[in-house]
């Protein structure tokens, strides 16, 4: 076999290793995406075989749906609110637990543990914290002579609770990302800054934070994507109520599909969510890339 033929054969053999990945990509991503776009242009009810083509009618309905406007607002609150809290707490915890303090390994494990728990289990746990009749929080309020609060009857309280619980569950992921950034930081740069008299806030703002920019970008993007597609936590804690007041886009899709039997409309909302997450992620990545960390 000549060298030319050997390299050609070797190249073809290596290309075969891509085949399983391509098959998985087509079956689980490309095909469902194309199917979703097609279904979003039909009046399918989700159960019968009949699928009448309606063009962009579902998309027109979406942007005239008063409930959907509230759902979009909630989704942005869940996404950006959770992301903000997780960055602040995650970075603070990482800085604290990066120091040489006794029991830091155990504390890291405890903070990260909720991320390993199912969101459904997490939601059930905190449902019994905020429940009106026998909730732990209302029991504490009564101990101090205060009136019980119907937390889930108030839309603003309910949205805030979802953001809080989601942040508590996944703050450990942000902490781990920032810890990894702190532990791989160029110590020569840090030591040189200390020699120049950079300590405390000055050192953090001018040295630590710029060196953590890759970790910051990773943490923000992961938290934001997770928050924008939040489903199970909302479903368990509030069920989307009162009314539609706490629905995220993901839970609204389920409501439209299973409760209202408008699968075509639900598919249109799903396509919108896909585009929304893609655009927001791209804009955030682009914005963070242009951020002047050295300023």
Image: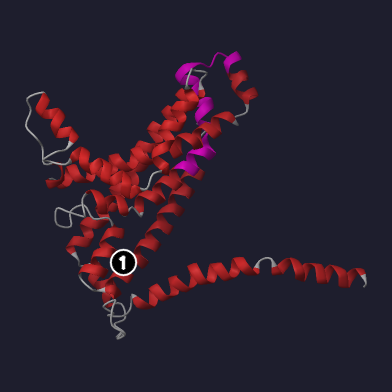
In the drawing, does residue 196 fall left or right of residue 52?
A: right
Which residue ends up furthest to the front in the rendered image?
134
Provide residue 3's location: percent of width, then percent of height.
91, 68
Q: Is residue 211 among the parts visible in the rendering? A: no
Q: Describe the element under mark 1 as helix, strand or loop.
A: helix
Q: Residue at 46% of width from left, 30% of height from top?
A: 108
Instruction: Please count the marks in the image.
Output: 1
Residue 274 percent location from the top left of the image = 39, 62
**Residue of label 1:** 269
Q: Decide whether the magenta segment is chiefly helix, strand or loop.
A: helix
Q: What is the crowding at mark 1: few (fewer than 14 residues within 10 Å), some, or many (at least 20)?
A: many
- The spot of residue 194 in percent (x, y) is 57, 16
Q: Which residues are magenta?
A: 194-219
- Place residue 107 in its image quadrant: top left
Q: How far from the left and from the top, in percent, is residue 4? A: 88, 70
Residue positioned 52% across, 38% down in the render: 215
Between 194 and 96, the one lying in front of the other is 96
Q: Quadrant of residue 175?
A: top left
Scheme of image coloration: secondary structure
Residue 144 in sight: yes
Q: In the rendered view, tell whether residue 25 sits above or below residue 282.
A: below
Which residue is at 30% across, 47% downward? 78
Residue 276 covered by magenta stretch? no
Residue 214 magenta: yes
Q: 287 or 76, which lies in front?
A: 76
Q: Is residue 91 left or right of residue 180?
A: left
Q: Is 20 placed above or below 70 here?
A: below
Q: Residue at x 26, y 69 (%)?
A: 257
* Quadrant, the N terminus: bottom right
């Amino acid at each position: 076999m000549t060298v030319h033929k050997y390299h050609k054969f070797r190249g073809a053999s290596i290309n075969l290793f891509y085949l399983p990945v391509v098959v998985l990509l087509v079956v689980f991503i490309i095909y469902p995406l194309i199917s979703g776009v097609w279904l979003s242009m039909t009046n399918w009810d989700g159960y019968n075989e009949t699928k009448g083509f309606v063009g962009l009618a579902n998309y027109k309905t979406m942007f005239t749906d008063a409930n959907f406007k509230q759902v979009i607002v909630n989704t942005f609150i869940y996404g950006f609110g959770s992301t903000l809290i997780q960055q602040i707490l995650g970075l603070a915890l990482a800085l604290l637990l990066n120091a040489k303090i006794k029991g830091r390994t155990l504390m890291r494990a405890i903070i990260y543990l909720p991320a390993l728990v199912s969101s459904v289990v997490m939601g059930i746990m905190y449902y019994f914290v905020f429940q009106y009749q026998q909730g732990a929080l209302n029991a504490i309020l009564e101990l101090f002579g205060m009136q019980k609060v119907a937390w889930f009857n108030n839309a603003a309280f309910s949205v805030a609770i979802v953001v809080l619980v989601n942040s508590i569950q996944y703050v450990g992921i942000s902490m781990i990302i920032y810890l990894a950034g702190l532990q791989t930081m160029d110590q020569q740069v840090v030591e040189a800054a200390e020699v120049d008299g950079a300590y405390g806030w000055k050192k953090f703002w001018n040295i630590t934070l710029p060196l953590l920019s890759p970790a910051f970008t990773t943490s923000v993007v992961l938290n934001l994507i997770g928050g924008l597609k939040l489903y199970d936590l909302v479903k368990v804690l509030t069920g989307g109520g009162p009314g539609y007041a706490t629905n995220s886009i993901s839970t609204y899709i389920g409501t439209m599909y299973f409760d209202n039997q408008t699968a075509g409309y639900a598919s249109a909302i799903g396509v919108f969510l896909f585009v929304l997450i893609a655009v927001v992620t791209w804009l955030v990545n682009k914005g963070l890339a242009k951020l002047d960390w050295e300023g």
